[in-house]
Image (spheres, rainbow, N blue to C red):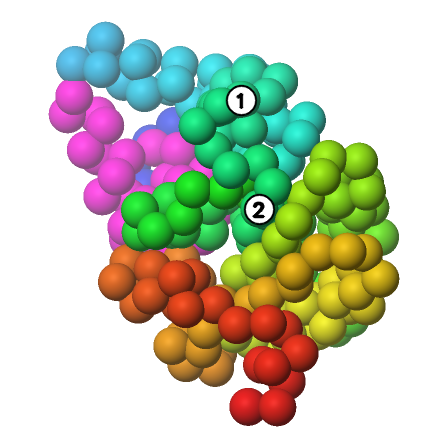
Amino acid sequence: MNFSSKLLENAVAEFAKLPGVGQKTALRLVLHLLNQEKTEVEKFSSSISKLRNEIQFCSICQNISDQAICEICASPKRDHTTICVVEDTRDVMAVQNTNQYNGVYHVLGGLISPMDGIGPSDLEVDSLVERIRENGVKEVIFALSATMEGDTTLFYLHKRLKDYNIIISTIARGIAFGGELEYVDEITLGRSIATRVPYESSLSR
């Protein structure tokens, strides 16, 4: 792709680094910004810069937050005895959108994937165990993607948690194998949470 401006070329190259954005889409986005008022572009730039520099991770659940403790963990209206374990922030948003869950969350920050060099020590597993050990948790719900990595992570977590006096359950498999949580429609996901089953029962299905 030939560019008439080095500044344009550099901007397109940066946008093209975003997931799912090719050069043509990146060019369209950059040209759109060029057609906006300078104040609007500055506002856009400032919001991205503030996001990167000021965002925090909740010290309790590891979810993305504006404060040291996120709004969900800080809310007295949530059921703090039930923890829904998810892969990342996108899954927290997906479950929240179902309006079928009133507990709190624990964000692992990924899934176990030996092929990608990701092991248990790379995830927020120890902090989950610590929460269960200290905070009177009654139930842990695994809400992980129905993939090989999700099942591997689920199996490992169950081994770590099975000796604690808690209910360990997993969302019902209304989600096709290979499906990622963030792409499941709200009704299906909500039903899967509401009809969750004990983890041991899911192994025989």
State the residue at coordinates (41%, 81%).
Answer: 176
Residue sticking out furthest to the bottom? 204
Please give the label number shown on residue 74.
1
Which of labels 1 and 2 is toward the front?
2
State the residue at coordinates (73%, 72%).
Answer: 155
Q: Secondary structure at mark 2?
A: strand
Q: Is residue 90 above or below residue 159?
A: above
Residue 127 in sight: no
Q: Is residue 73 above or below residue 152?
A: above
Q: Position of residue 44 (x, y in %)?
A: 32, 20
Q: Pick whichever, 34 or 63, lies toward us.
A: 63
Q: Which residue is mark 2?
A: 82
Of the numbered discs 1 and 2, the one sitting upstream in the chain is 1
Quadrant in the picture for the C terminus:
bottom right
Q: Amino acid at mark 1?
A: Ala
| Residue 151 lies within the magenta run | no
Q: Pick whichever, 78 or 63, lies toward us.
A: 78
Q: Quadrant of residue 167?
A: bottom right
- Image: magenta residue range: 8-36
